[in-house]
Image: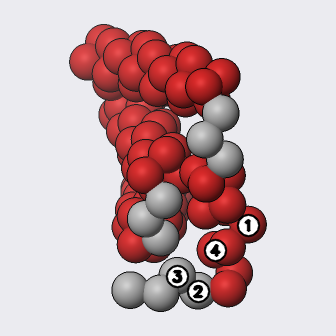
Amino acid sequence: MIPSPALQPILALAAEADPSNDVIYTGAYIGLALALLLALLRFLRGPTMPDRVVALDLMAIFAAATIGLTAITTGTSELIIVAIVLALLMFMGTTVFAMYLERKGRADAP
């Protein structure tokens, strides 16, 4: 599949075969994994439902970033589209949950 022209600058980063890039990519993967673990800890500890939803949204953002980083390191443009779709779906889910909490708050008010 031919990558779209809009993705050419992003995928050009992978074409530069510099050994220092491997160190940078490895550091980025380690940083994303650590951030994902910390967000998972917040998800498990809570204490409230909004805390858990924000942590889940944060984990999805880190997953999308990991997919984007993988797209850059491998040079596949299809993965960037997957990352964008994942980020948009999680944003919509968080927005729907915020609307639910707002309506629930109005119903509880005297």
Residue that appears at 40% across and 36% down: 59
Q: Which mark is residue 75?
A: none
Which element carries disc 3, helix, strand or loop? Answer: loop
Q: Earlier in the sequence, mark 1 or mark 3?
A: 3
Using the image as rendered, state which of residue 3 and residue 46 is in the foreground: 3
Colour scheme shown: secondary structure
Circle 2 sits on which residue? Answer: 4
Proximity of marks 1 and 3: CB atoms separated by less than 8 Å: no
Give the position of the N terminus as an image quadrant. Answer: bottom left
Evaluate if marks 4 and 1 touch, with contact meaning CB atoms under 8 Å apart.
yes
Q: Is residue 46 something one can see in this rendering?
A: no
Residue at screen point 36% across, 31% down: 52
SS label for mark 1: helix
Q: Which residue is mark 4?
A: 7
* Badge 2 density bin: few <14, some 14–19, many ≥20, Cα 10 Å: few
Q: Position of residue 42 (x, y in %)?
A: 39, 17
Tell me the distance, in whole angstroms, between the alpha carbons under discs 2 and 3: 4 Å
Amino acid type of disc 3? Pro
Q: Is residue 72 left or right of residue 24?
A: left
Mark 2 in CB contact with mark 3 (< 8 angstroms): yes
Count residues near mark 3 (Cα–Cα under 10 Å), then give few for <14, some for 14-19, many for 20+.
Answer: few
Residue type, mark 2 in image = Ser
Residue at which label 3 appears: 3
